Image: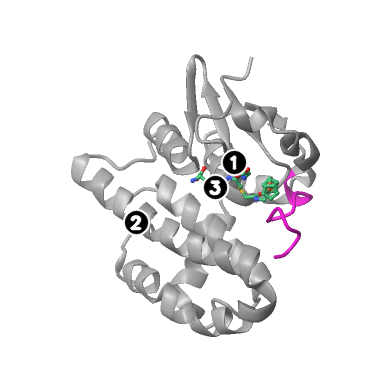
Amino acid sequence: MAPYTLTYFPVKGRCGALKMILADNEQQFKENLVSIDDWMKGDKKGSCLFGQLPKFEDGDLVLFQSNAILRHVGRKHGAYGKNDCEASLIDMMNDAVEDFRLKYIKMIYQEYETGKEAYCKDLPNHLKPFESILSKSKSGFLVGDQISFADYNLFDLLLNHKVLYSASLDSLPALKGYVDKIAARPKIKALLECENFKKLPINGNGKQ
Ligand code: 6SG
């Protein structure tokens, strides 16, 4: 029996990175897809701690909040650094990825038509700190010498940006190399090529 259960909408959304870290660690999970119609009925929302999905179950442990879920899986599968200092740096990186994700989500859900062009133009400024960190990284990862949950999170968001604007990484060689390197990890490559994953829209409103 799969140890984990993930309940979410049929989109990549806030679960792309989670699916990547699970795949890379060969972890099976049961997936409960909740359609928008079903969600709109309201009773599922009422059963969620903060009224939102994703929900992740690991045995009796029930977690909400996508970043808490990523941390839990990272902690269990060796993707949370090798000591407390690395873990704190990984937390810092993931918080920066979350800030970036919130900007992306705001543009996608609230100002796609009016704000996409300015957003794409400003993208190198958003991405500059990550480019600088990665250009100095010996391992090619955000922190330390191994991949962490923050890397899967940033990678997932950068893939979304390549769809948004194909030239988004053209002026950022370290980030471009980073994306290519993570995409070439065999289990990540297999996930990205898997029909079930590919067919999921990135966002819930059909914009990408
Ligand atoms: C949406 O925002 O798809 N969860 C979403 N929306 C439904 O009633 N901080 C936490 C976390 O990191 C944020 C959770 C996140 O886990 S994900 C949620 O539960 C709600 O609030 C992105 C996504 N959005 C679009 C969408 C289509 C169907 C359900 C969600 C639009 C919103 C509600 C119905 C139609 Fe919808």
Q: Determine which of the numbered discs, if any, sits on residue 51 in the image.
A: none
**Residue placed under numbered mark 1 in the picture:** 19
Residue 130 x, y percent position in the rendering:
38, 68
N-terminal label among 2 and 3: 3
Amino acid at dot 1: Lys
Does the closest atom of ligand 1 sit within 8 Å of the Cβ of label 1? no
| Residue that protrudes farthest toward the left in the picture | 85
Q: Are marks 3 and 1 in contact (CB under 8 Å)?
A: yes
| 73 over 206 or under it: above or below | above
Question: Crowding at label 2, few (<14), some or many (≥20) Cα neighbours within 10 Å?
Answer: many
Q: Are marks 1 and 2 in contact (CB under 8 Å)?
A: no
Which secondary structure class fits the magenta region best? loop
C-alpha gap between disc 3 and disc 1 = 5 Å
Q: Secondary structure at mark 1?
A: helix
Does the closest atom of ligand 1 sit within 8 Å of the Cβ of label 3? no
Verify whether residue 173 appears in magenta. Answer: no
Q: Determine which of the numbered discs, if any, sits on residue 17 in the image.
A: 3
**Residue placed under numbered mark 2 in the picture:** 93
Q: Which residues are magenta?
A: 197-208
